[in-house]
Image (cartoon, helix red, strand yellow):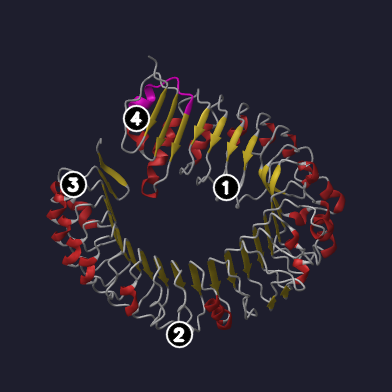
């Protein structure tokens, strides 16, 4: 029987038959098949997923082996690290139909790629460093799917993209001033669908030029983003901006619309008259001159609305609701961000009903003149960042929320009295960048449902409140950037995850670890004065993952670590004074992965077969030291 398919996984490494035609792998798996891979002559499909950041370096080694298989039709190397020579070699795979290098580190696509005349799919989505495409890309006549979504560093389009008449997907188009780069290149690409982002609209010459884009004929488009450069100078007139946007009316099938950097003072009729009735998501950003908003409240299917950097908008109210009895009937998420002059938010329309009862997520960020939030009982997720203390006090009225994020408020030393006293439904609380916050005393006492507590960069906070120990539902606690905390108070035994990061004065861990019978993840990072782990660590019977990073004061690990019978992953990095590993590690039969990095003493003592600590770790299936794979055993 001819074996044509082969799947290689982390813990499953079969023999690669010479007859294999289709192969997939995860992470570093193919790196162990040097000779087997060379012997395969009939490979047609290879999909390899690089999903573990610890193993990033291996992706380059694997990639060079791939280029020798000149019969490949399908090649997927998403999230890989590339070098220039590799992409040039891929340009020699003349039979290639499908190439996916999305989410990769590639910066420039070589000219050789344009010689792939059979290529039908080229996925470059979210290649964040990609700044240049091949000049002759217009010659790739077989291209059907070209995805440039999220390629934010891309500077310009190749000339003549309008000649790719079979395109069904493009993702991004950057308007240029030169012939072959105008917005008119989109005129004949009427079959493109999915998402399209048109950038640098300040290069459009006016109404007639914009009409050449022919957006109304592109009935397969579901998402459209229109953007002008926000840093563009005043040479680009307000009138020209209004003409361009007026001419870029999309088809009524559109589901998502984003407009950014628009210089006009009014929106076109196709927005004011709601000619896009099927819109589900709208984002208006940096439309600095628009004082009045379109009547989005009439859109029956609108679920997500974002208003950001709309500096002349002072009121959200009747003009957006118009005279409908039930404005925003489907709205689920509303974001108001950097609305510097927003003063008032009205939620009803001339005595009509309140705003959507579907609204469950509300984010307010940097609205310095907004002093009050309307009561919206349906909201479950509330985020308030860098607003007035008066606005923060509105939280007391949102007693049904399950998630709350408070960020900024640099001047606030204590939270407003009774802010959280009635929030018995709250499950997640995040407090971030409150630089002057000195105390959380009595604020957490009534949070009987709280499962996740995240406290980040509260510089003046010296300790956690005593009430934390009574949070019997708490499962995850993250403490990050609290330079004055010296020790942890008693914590609830329900904790499953504990992360302590950048607490430079922390000198010891609580002996209360003995009560953490449910803890399965423990992280200690950048606690520079931490000198040891307590012996009570032996009670962490459920611990599966342990990370100790950038703790130079730690010179040894307690031998009681041998009692961590559930431990399967351990990472130690940046602990320059850690002298050795305890002998007790030998007892950790479940330990499958050990990663050591930037620990010179351990590097020397853990050398394979030679180091003094090697007998203590030889049983561990996968060992990585300074990004080098030292050992990887079969299941």
Residue 333, placed above or below residue 147: below
**Looking at the image, is mark 3 or mark 4 nearer the viewer?**
3
For the residues labelled 1 and 2, the Cα–Cα distance comes to 45 Å
The residue that mark 4 highlights is: 34
Q: Quadrant of the C terminus?
A: top left
**Nearer to the camera, 413 or 177:** 413
Q: Quadrant of the N terminus?
A: top left
The residue that mark 3 highlights is: 589
Q: Which residue is found at the position 63% from the left and 36% from the top? A: 145
**Mark 3 vs 4, N-terminal side:** 4
Image position, residue 194 (x, y; %) = 66, 43
Q: Is residue 123 left or right of residue 324?
A: left
Q: Is residue 173 magenta?
A: no
**Looking at the image, is mark 1 or mark 2 nearer the viewer?**
2
For the residues labelled 3 and 2, the Cα–Cα distance comes to 49 Å
Q: Is residue 37 magenta?
A: yes
- The mark total stands at 4
Which element is circle 2 on?
A: loop
Q: Residues within 10 Å of mark 4 (few under 14, many from 20)?
A: few
The residue that mark 1 highlights is: 130
Q: Residues within 10 Å of mark 2 (few under 14, many from 20)?
A: some
**Mark 3 vs 1, N-terminal side:** 1
**Magenta residue span:** 34-45
Q: Is residue 580 left or right of residue 481?
A: left
**Mark 4 vs 1, N-terminal side:** 4
Q: Which mark is residue 413?
A: 2
């Amino acid at each position: 029987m001819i074996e044509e398919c082969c799947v290689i996984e982390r813990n499953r490494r079969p023999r690669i038959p010479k007859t294999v035609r289709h192969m997939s792998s995860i992470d570093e798996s193919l790196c162990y098949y040097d000779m087997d891979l060379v012997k395969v002559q009939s490979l047609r499909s290879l999909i390899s997923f690089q999903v573990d950041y610890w193993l990033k370096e291996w992706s380059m080694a694997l990639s060079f082996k791939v280029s020798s298989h000149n019969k490949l039709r399908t090649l997927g190397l998403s999230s890989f690290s590339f070098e220039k020579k590799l992409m040039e070699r891929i340009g020699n795979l003349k039979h290639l139909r499908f190439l996916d290098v999305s989410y990769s580190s590639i910066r420039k696509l070589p000219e050789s790629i344009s010689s792939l005349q059979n290529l039908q799919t080229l996925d470059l989505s979210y290649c964040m460093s990609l700044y240049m495409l091949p000049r002759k890309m217009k010659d790739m006549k077989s291209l059907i799917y070209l995805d440039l979504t999220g390629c934010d560093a891309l500077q310009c389009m190749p000339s003549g993209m309008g000649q790719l008449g079979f395109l069904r997907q493009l993702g991004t188009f950057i308007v240029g001033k030169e012939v072959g780069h105008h917005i008119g290149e989109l005129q004949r690409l009427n079959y493109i669908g999915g998402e399209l982002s048109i950038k640098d609209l300040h290069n459009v010459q006016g109404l007639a030029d914009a009409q050449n884009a022919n957006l109304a004929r592109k009935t397969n488009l579901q998402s459209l983003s229109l953007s002008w450069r926000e840093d563009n100078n005043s040479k680009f007139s307000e009138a020209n901006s209004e003409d361009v946007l007026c001419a870029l009316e999309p088809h009524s099938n559109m589901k998502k619309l984003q407009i950014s950097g628009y210089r006009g003072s009014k929106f076109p009729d196709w927005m004011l008259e709601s000619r896009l009735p099927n819109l589900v998501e709208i984002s208006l950003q940096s439309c600095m001159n628009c004082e009045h908003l379109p009547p989005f409240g009439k859109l029956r299917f609108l679920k997500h609305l974002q208003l950001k950097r709309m500096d002349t908008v002072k009121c959200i109210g009747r003009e957006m609701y118009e005279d409908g009895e039930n404005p925003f009937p489907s709205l689920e998420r509303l974001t108001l961000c950097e609305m510097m002059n927003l003063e008032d938010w009205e939620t009803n329309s001339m005595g009509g009903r309140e705003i959507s009862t579907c609204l469950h997520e509300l984010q307010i960020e940097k609205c310095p003149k907004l002093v009050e939030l309307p009561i919206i009982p349906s909201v479950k997720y509330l985020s308030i960042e860098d607003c007035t203390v008066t606005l923060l006090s509105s939280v007391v009225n949102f007693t049904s929320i399950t998630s709350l994020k408070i960020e900024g408020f640099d001047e606030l030393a204590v939270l407003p009295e009774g802010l959280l006293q009635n929030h018995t439904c709250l499950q997640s609380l995040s407090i971030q960048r409150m630089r002057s916050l000195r105390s959380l005393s009595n604020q957490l006492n009534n949070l009987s449902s709280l499962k996740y507590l995240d406290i980040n960069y509260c510089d003046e906070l010296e300790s956690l409140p005593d009430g934390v120990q009574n949070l019997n539902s708490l499962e995850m606690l993250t403490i990050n950037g609290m330079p004055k905390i010296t020790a942890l108070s008693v914590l609830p035994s329900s904790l499953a995850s504990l992360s302590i990061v950048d607490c430079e004065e922390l000198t010891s861990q609580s002996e209360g670890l003995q009560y953490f019978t449910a803890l399965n993840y423990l992280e200690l990072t950048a606690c520079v004065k931490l000198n040891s782990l307590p012996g009570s660590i032996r009670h962490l019977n459920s611990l599966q993952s342990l990370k100790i990073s950038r703790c130079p004061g730690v010179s040894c690990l307690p031998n009681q670590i041998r009692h961590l019978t559930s431990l399967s992953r351990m990472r130690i990095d940046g602990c320059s004074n850690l002298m050795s590993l305890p002998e007790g590690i030998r007892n950790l039969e479940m330990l499958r992965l050990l990663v050591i990095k930037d620990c010179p003493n351990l590097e020397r003592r853990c050398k394979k077969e030679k180091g003094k600590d090697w007998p203590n770790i030889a049983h561990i299936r996968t060992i990585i030291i300074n990004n080098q794979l030292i050992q990887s055993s079969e299941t």
